[in-house]
Amino acid sequence: RRESVMKYIPATHAERERILAAVGVRAVEDLFRDIPAEVRLKRPLDLPPAAPDPTLLAHLRALAERNTDCDRLACFLGAGAYDHFVPSTVPHLALRPEFLTAYTPYQAEIMQGELQAIYEYQSMMCELTGMDVANASMYDGASATGEAASMAADLTKRTEVLISTAVHPEYRQVLRTYTSHLPITVRELPALDGVTSVEAARAAITDATAALIVQSPNFFGAIEEGEALAKAAHDKGALLVVAVAEPISLGLLRPPGEYGADIVTGEGQALGNALNFGGPYLGMIATREAFVRRIPGRLVGRTVDTAGRPGYVLTLQTREQHIRRAKATSNICTNESLNALVAAVYLATLGRQGVVHVAELCARKAHYARERIAALPGYALAFAAPTFNEFVVRCPVPPAEINRRLLTHGILGGLPLGRFYPEYDDCWLLCVTEQRSREEIDHLVDHLETVR
Amino acid sequence: RRESVMKYIPATHAERERILAAVGVRAVEDLFRDIPAEVRLKRPLDLPPAAPDPTLLAHLRALAERNTDCDRLACFLGAGAYDHFVPSTVPHLALRPEFLTAYTPYQAEIMQGELQAIYEYQSMMCELTGMDVANASMYDGASATGEAASMAADLTKRTEVLISTAVHPEYRQVLRTYTSHLPITVRELPALDGVTSVEAARAAITDATAALIVQSPNFFGAIEEGEALAKAAHDKGALLVVAVAEPISLGLLRPPGEYGADIVTGEGQALGNALNFGGPYLGMIATREAFVRRIPGRLVGRTVDTAGRPGYVLTLQTREQHIRRAKATSNICTNESLNALVAAVYLATLGRQGVVHVAELCARKAHYARERIAALPGYALAFAAPTFNEFVVRCPVPPAEINRRLLTHGILGGLPLGRFYPEYDDCWLLCVTEQRSREEIDHLVDHLETVR
Amino acid sequence: MSTPEAPTRTPSLRKRPVPVIFERGAPGRVGYSLPESDVPEAPLDAVVPAAHRRSRPAALPEVSELDVVRHYTALSHRNFSIDEGFYPLGSCTMKYNPKINEDAARQAGFARLHPYAPEDLAQGALELLWELEHAMAEITGMDRVTFQPAAGAHGELTSLLMISRYFEEKGERRGTIIVPDSAHGTNPASATFAGYKVVEVKSDRRGNIDLEALRAALNRDVAALMFTNPNTLGLFEEQILEVARAVHNVGAQLYLDGANFNAILGITRPGDQGFDVMHLNLHKTFTTPHGGGGPGAGAVGVRAHLVPFLPAPTVERDGQRFTLDHDRPKTIGKMRAFYGNFGNLVRAYTYIRTMGAAGLREASEMAVLNANYLLARLRDHFEVPYDRVCKHEFVLSGRWQRDRHHVTTRDMAKRLLDYGFHAPTIYFPLIVEEAIMIEPTETESLQTLDAFVETMVAIAHEAETDPEVVRTAPHEAPVTRLDEVTAARKPNLRWRPEE
Amino acid sequence: MSTPEAPTRTPSLRKRPVPVIFERGAPGRVGYSLPESDVPEAPLDAVVPAAHRRSRPAALPEVSELDVVRHYTALSHRNFSIDEGFYPLGSCTMKYNPKINEDAARQAGFARLHPYAPEDLAQGALELLWELEHAMAEITGMDRVTFQPAAGAHGELTSLLMISRYFEEKGERRGTIIVPDSAHGTNPASATFAGYKVVEVKSDRRGNIDLEALRAALNRDVAALMFTNPNTLGLFEEQILEVARAVHNVGAQLYLDGANFNAILGITRPGDQGFDVMHLNLHKTFTTPHGGGGPGAGAVGVRAHLVPFLPAPTVERDGQRFTLDHDRPKTIGKMRAFYGNFGNLVRAYTYIRTMGAAGLREASEMAVLNANYLLARLRDHFEVPYDRVCKHEFVLSGRWQRDRHHVTTRDMAKRLLDYGFHAPTIYFPLIVEEAIMIEPTETESLQTLDAFVETMVAIAHEAETDPEVVRTAPHEAPVTRLDEVTAARKPNLRWRPEE
Ligand SMILES: Cc1ncc(COP(=O)(O)O)c(C=O)c1O
Ligand SMILES: Cc1ncc(COP(=O)(O)O)c(C=O)c1O
């Protein structure tokens, strides 16, 4: 037997024999006789050989080095995944094994740490979004938005959702997939000049519309006219769902709850979670008090024990699949609690001032980059609306070509929009976070000047 | 005020005012009036400006990358610091903040974890070395050997120590420094063909000799004739001190306690501690029951509490400086407990079988490399004695030159002995641990073939 | 067992509540450090118009770094984790989460990689995904595997949507999903979420699905049977081949809920048993940590006829180069943004490479041996509703204790906490009254299993001799039982700043 | 304060002993994974002769990886650390150890760097050492600094040996070191270890050294006065300049034990006060973690006349290149192998770069403010032997409680543990009966200081009203008071395998 296997399977040969004897069988095969012989595997699985730790770590180091990560590039790429600074407290605290290797807090009395941390996370999400209730997490921003659609349909008893094309394309794809076999039709509301037109929205919303779904800052980085859009929706009895893909923006921008959002979904990756090539990320969902019993996923509530001590429990579980089964508000079970904990530690570390500080840095640096690039001959801003830390540039050469050239200078360029918007194939979505120094921005601009 | 400072100094301006009021002074300066005005600093210290976390981490990453560490080279360099594989359990467990940020366990009742871990470490050291008692750690192998000399002088009431030139040159330097102002004279015993000559030792030991100090495996990688050397020392009433710079060897080799060592010192770095450019490392010292009250440093003992539960305490403290002051057995206070804990977790993880396994891998790979290099035209083994994982090669070109050439192929060559032994300036001390693959050894050999 | 204690007149430290983080700190205190802006100063209104800016900062904590460290360290000490003790949670496969997996996944080359980085910059990540897919296909006997699902239930939904597209392609519209009454709640919930009607089929006395009832329920409106095998009773469905035949006879698809895969690694493959599609919980069988509730990682394997419907993108290899194939005309689309919970996929890959084929089989053998060992040693003390050889887990009933001593399964579960064990899964599956579902996993030692048995027996004895101590348990936890009724009646779901 | 508890009949979990690791596991169990040998098989006797091999393997634990994880996790939960609570240990400067320091020091570029790597491969490490030396020289007012000492006491020895060489160079032989009666034990111990006779000088009523006694003790045989300033009473020596003059008048050297430097960062510099040589404990003032007893890092600063005697090697800069200078003809030699506790030097450097000049000064200001705050709030409840403005720490006496209520300082210290605080340093300095030495540091919040005050006052009250609960404390710890007498009489210093 290989140590690499034995170290995870403690039973020694002698112990295995003792167990067999206690169970009363001669060989372990006797325990598998209930499996029809014809489907019992007669051969070993065809897998790469077991690798001892040193060999395996060397292999994994080599794989990791075949990637070029954001420590090795100046990253101007965002589009739903953001390169923010993560304070040292975050991994040191959130990844403590007591949190990392715990299961869902079904035994509340011995999981008060997890439960309290999530209760605090819910509170922070409410503060950020301006909503009354936030849940303990969803899979990611896209799937949370998908769930919001059916939540809205249920709440309004209506069958159509209207989604702006300025919402992240992958969120829209997920929404379509999620609703494909539900009695919900998805209509897209074209965002013509980089923002969702309030007039178009008002015109498009009917009394069959369950919800208008927008993203703010939207996929083009522009800040939507939340208040007007909320009014447009509410006037027709529809709900406003606001997706927030870049929650750092909420350090500076008006919280959706303040301008009338009924449901806020979002992607919490930016709140201290690693880029991780796309996951695990953090699905956020928050809503108004009135809708609490329809919110999907877990909720932690504060209560007291028999001695009157404050304590925390999973609550309102009658919404959930393990109680309600086919009638549950969602099928979600395992969620992204650890990422929620990461967000909580991140927000606690930055705190009231730090969240404003980081948001302002993003906005100021992006604004500087935006103005400088706009001033370059051949380059122009695609849209006029105010932005946060992303903006769209029209380029004199194909954006993909620009990215290739920038890479040779250690710069990870923005997203060529043509991939998702054929009509914008000369457009380039740039992101500037607090991580980018003025020097890096100036380099970017200098190189752009040469690419014409 | 900068956040980088505020995050470590929680008092807000308002709180500072409250504190000043409670203390009853108007300004903090009032608390420094007892410092003569002429020596109060009138200017700010001239230091680099405070750096915010992201900037500072980038700077430190850059500094770290200006080094070429053993992840980026095939390391054949040892000479007192060894590149061994460190299982993932070691940092994950030993660096838990509960251990890392605790002080010396003066309040035993709330430090049972630390105390028990060190008690277990002491036990493991005894098992490895074959001695009765081991202490809770010394600074490093060299200083531990220095302390052993005065321990031996005390125990024997003799004034001379004899040390083989096959002991690590830096250990010998430290011994000289340590004893420079003590009534102890240090004599060196030349090791002519790579091992300490038993005859020479017998001849050199007088009845003024407190101890014969050898290292095994010695600095040249050779295994000393421990038994005969012990006899030579004991015949004249001297003690045998054995320094172990590569404790992994004890997985395979006879423990010094078995062949008559009276004091074993050593360097525990190899037991799971990082190379760390030379420190912090782990000073080991162990001895016989009879000498326990003369051993330097802390000892953890097992006892019971008032309810009869087993528990652990710092014990025999009357040996130590905080009780005995000028009459203490040593001046050591802060030691290397965390490195001892690292060694304990390492030894627990490898366990009874693993320590043998890693030792055999080292010996076999070094043996293979040694035979292959010996067979190369122009190269020869400097010495004949059996070795563990280091050996000395005579080279056709200056070793430093060989190292320069190997570096261009990603190989970190051995130590040119000329630096410490002018008479061996064509000699090269090579180390082969379990980390080196046959492929790397063959590359080394192939390149040597071209260097002639 | 118990030792005399000196008198204490202090409240137990462990039972002292930890204040919420909002109540720590002081106004104006900070725990972060960021640079000042290095770009030319512009009036904030020019950067973001005032109308779009928030009027007051979010009421987040105002704490120092040490405040943060103390708070979350204290909370971590009020948890129960695999690293601290035995976690026999049935159906959850709480096996050891190797530390090396963490070291692998936390490397900057993985953790700091942007999902939209050009493929050339992500070859290592793509290669890992490709290798992992092929390993999982071999382990399950499926033709292809997607890792887009974030968890098991997400995998269920993914699978059902693929099944729907499959029937659409064939021009059929089917509206029913069958689930056994022993199924996990996510099965029916996923079916509903996919727009299906759910029909439940009961189990027979041996704990298998009732074949007659199944046959009766099957018809041309049935899109699929969602089947868990070994099922949630920890029993292998002896008539699996008949089940498959019956399902396929009406042209329906056979779906495997693979949450219990830890029983059959290298022993039998769903692909060989006739399953068309299945999900795996990598956070169970493949050691990725549960993180206190998530993230997990789902994997969905399909037979060839369902491959066209896989979520996009897939990972493809040409020669030495790995690419993302977004051009999948028949795909159901996307189940989430990007490609999946990559960080956990690195962990699962590391685990598979550590174990190899023989190691994985050995894991299942020991998981099953350990479960049968516990069953053998507990059978005289608790009712055994389905008395068969079990797989990786088994289900007891607390009926004896309830009926004879008015001590419920919940009471006994809470009492276990006093002895330093996590409780088993209780009151699931629903078909067993007072259910106690125990899964030891292969990573627990015989010493731990024996200690658990002795404690269970001791508690069964307490139920007879000292029922009150069981009914009022736990006594050792930071809190005693919590008022869940009030929690649900008057929900307090967030801290609020005083205005 | 206390809350009613449900009855429990289980032994408290926290008080259950953790078995020694040797008693975990089972024969033949393993928790490691290494490759098999990949070199041509050779008979072991040919590799290492049997005569040199051990006859039986060392009786090390035989445990699985999970056994190891559970064991050390459990032990870690039986500790008390800065991350868990207030640690007012006088003289130890238990300030917060920043997490960023750990991230900096654990980088492979530092942690995996071989000490004998050619200088070209270690330029980053050498640059850091060079920068740190210059920062420390500026902070202390010394001309050069060595980081070779592993700790404070090691720095003391280093300094004394340099002083000896200095006098040798001058052809003098001096045999006496003077230490105040308030000095830390390492001072006289180091003096002895350096071959000196130790003469103790008493302190005066204000807690300064008694100048008359000092003058009387000074003569041409005195090599140095080892002086701690602020001293171990937490008081700044008001006559420091007279002391320096008196010492220098007999040609002796003035040595500073800089363990208490946290009081004077940026406020006053020993180099300006007339000190010739000094040590710093980087594990106190400069936030490197104590690791449960070590490793620390000592730094020794010297004025120009002692520079030639510094341990070798020193770090030098020429242009952009950094080198190790081993060629120091007058050096005392080496105090340990290689260059020092480098890993901790990275942490100290990171801390200094985080704080900057203003930040370091602010740290000392708040450390002193916090100490005076605690003194002001505790003065009515405990005897204050030296009633002066203190620096970063202060000393109380438990005499009132001892004499009036037969409750000792030790009792009160143990009682503090029940309330979740570490105890202050007690029975040191020796010149104060029933000494209670309290150092809050600047990193503790006002909320923590207030909670500590309330607890101290509550304990003083308990000493009057309920002395027994104090005398028998602690009650909340995993164990009650331990039998130290037996521990010393019949030492059990190791586990032994049964033969
Ligand atoms: C049998 C079974 N099916 C499905 C699930 C759902 O998996 P997840 O929690 O990963 O969504 C679980 C896990 O709770 C389970 O035990
Ligand atoms: C005043 C004083 N001097 C010297 C020392 C010894 O320092 P170290 O423990 O680092 O050897 C200490 C620390 O315990 C101390 O407080």
Image (spheres, coloured by chain):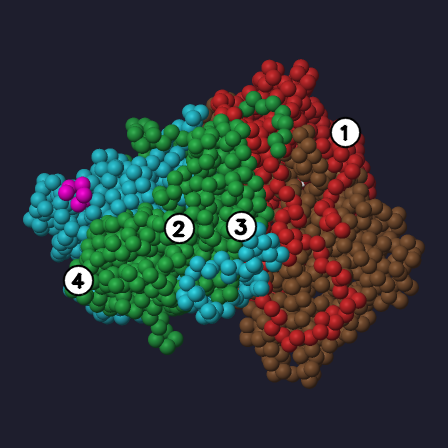
Chain colours: A cyan, B brown, C green, D red
Badge 4 and badge 2 in a common chain: yes
> The C terminus of chain C appears in which quarter of the rendering?
top left
Label 2 neighbour load within 10 Å: few <14, some 14-19, many 20+: some
Residue carrying label 1: D213
* Res C373 label: 3
Badge 3 and badge 4 in a common chain: yes
Q: Separation of disc 3 and disc 1 at Cα?
A: 78 Å
Q: Nearer the viewer, mark 4 or mark 1?
A: 4
Q: Nearer the viewer, mark 2 or mark 3?
A: 2
Q: Chain of mark 4?
A: C
The residue shown at (55%, 53%) is A24
Q: Separation of disc 4 and disc 1 at Cα?
A: 106 Å
Does the rendering let one see residue A295? yes
Badge 3 and badge 1 in a common chain: no
Residue carrying label 4: C172
Label 1 neighbour load within 10 Å: few <14, some 14-19, many 20+: some
Majority SS type along the magenta span: helix
Badge 4 and badge 1 in a common chain: no
Q: Is residue B451 above or below residue B168?
A: below
Residue A38: give x, y in percent of width and height: 41, 67
Amino acid type for the residue under numbered disc 4 = Glu
Q: Nearer the viewer, mark 4 or mark 2?
A: 2
Amino acid type for the residue under numbered disc 2 = Arg
Labels 4 and 2 touching (C-beta < 8 A): no
Asked if the residue at label 1 sits under 8 Å from ligand 2, the reply is no
Residue carrying label 2: C206
